[in-house]
Amino acid sequence: MNKWHWFSLGIVAGTVLAGGFGFATAGSPAGQEAAVSNDAPQVELAAAGATPAAPYAAAASDAAAPPDDDGKLRILVLGAHPDDCEIRAGGAAIFWSDLGHHVKLVSVTNGDIGHWQMSGGALAMRRNAEVQEAAKILGTTTVVLDIHDGELMPTLENRRTITRLVRRWGADVVIGHRPNDYHPDHRYTGVLMQDSAYMVSVPFFCPDAPPLAKNPVYLYSYDNFQRPNPFQPDVVVSIDGVIERKLDALLTMESQFVEGGALGYRDPLGDDPADREARRQRARERFRQRFANVADQCRDKLIELYGPEVGSQVRYAEAFEICEYGSRPAAEDLRRLFPFLPEKKQ
Ligand SMILES: [Zn+2]
């Protein structure tokens, strides 16, 4: 049995990819060139000195490294794939991290089918490398759980995994998808987040990770789905001041936004560098429009939070809805948890 088989078998759901072998492809052109072959990871892991034990080491270090008790906020963002956290909360993440707060982005699946031309371990490693590059721009800690893309289920094991993540990060705020999203991985990430909202407080559930003294505030990230109920913007953040940085972070994910992701076969990227650059610009503008749409959809709340003069002029936004589970924040709690919002407008 070769190394890659041992490696594949050795990984269990919830084992953390990030940091363990993100280095195997990060900054390595070979990682991208070899990416069309599922045989490539054998070579890359061997070349990087990775062994089947490496992912476990990463998981252990993740468990052992919560931020210091320094009075700063601890934010945990759950996204189904390596891009969802960055798209939905990347701007707020920049604001938090610039103020010294601790932001952890967790991709609950590894994204290993999110490309039209490549898949498997090679793609998972590439996507991990991409979000690690984005993390440098956003100022976050970013991890990717080694669960197959498209196969996330709301199992007991995954409930434990998410509960432990929330506890070990000491989260004040947890952000994730609503459970009525179009993608099954998004939906079940939302369900797992909801499942953790009570279980994080129960001492004998996962007693290896002590329960939190105070339940976090749970928030849903913005979406446009209307059934059974539309998204309700309880907190809306102007990201005008950080929009270019956020777009820079998103454009590190060329496998998704330049090469076309899972549906890229409809318009495959050729070898022309000019075409690649044109696609980068188009992706940038698509995202710009997407975040402008969020601001327009949530205009009333922007005006309520920022006042009519500023709120009516905000161009780009991220929005969050308070989940009914977990702590229920009052208005002053939200301003403490989102310290970059302006002072309360009278
Ligand atoms: Zn996704």
Image (spheres, rainbow, N blue to C red):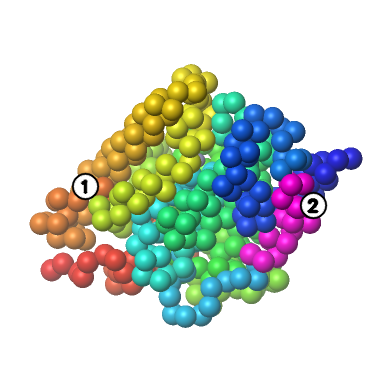
In this figure, which residue is indicated by the disc labeled 1? 315
Q: Position of residue 124 (x, y in %)?
A: 63, 41
| Side of 228 where 19 appears, left or right | right
Quarter containing the N terminus: top right
Could you tell which of marks 1 and 2 lies nearer the N-terminus?
Answer: 2
Asked if ligand 1 lies within 8 A of label 2, the reply is: no
Q: Amino acid at mark 2?
A: Pro
| Side of 271 where 300 appears, left or right | left
**Image position of 47 with respect to 58: above or below:** above
Q: Position of residue 235 (x, y in %)?
A: 31, 58
Q: Which residue is painted at 11% across and 56% down in the image?
A: 308
In this figure, which residue is indicated by the disc labeled 2? 52
Q: Amino acid at mark 1?
A: Arg
**Image position of 192 with respect to 214: above or below:** above
- Label 1's element? loop
Q: Which residue is painted at 62% across and 51% down in the image?
A: 22
Q: Position of residue 210 (x, y in %)?
A: 64, 74
Q: Which residue is painted at 70% across and 71% down in the image?
A: 208
Q: Quick one: label 2, few (<14), some, or many (20+) residues within 10 Å? A: some
- Is residue 156 visible to us here? no
- Asked which quadrant contains residue 72, the reply is bottom left
Which of 47/71 is in front?
47
Assess whether residue 61 is covered by the magenta stretch.
yes
Q: Nearer the viewer, mark 1 or mark 2?
A: 2
From mark 1 to mark 2, how far is it between C-alphas?
47 Å
Considering every residue shown, the one lying at the far top of the view is 266
- Is residue 306 visible to us here? yes
Instruction: Give the residues in magenta.
Output: 45-62
Q: Position of residue 346 (x, y in %)?
A: 13, 68
- Asked which quadrant contains residue 345, the reply is bottom left
- Label 2's element? loop
**Image position of 26 with respect to 275: above or below:** below
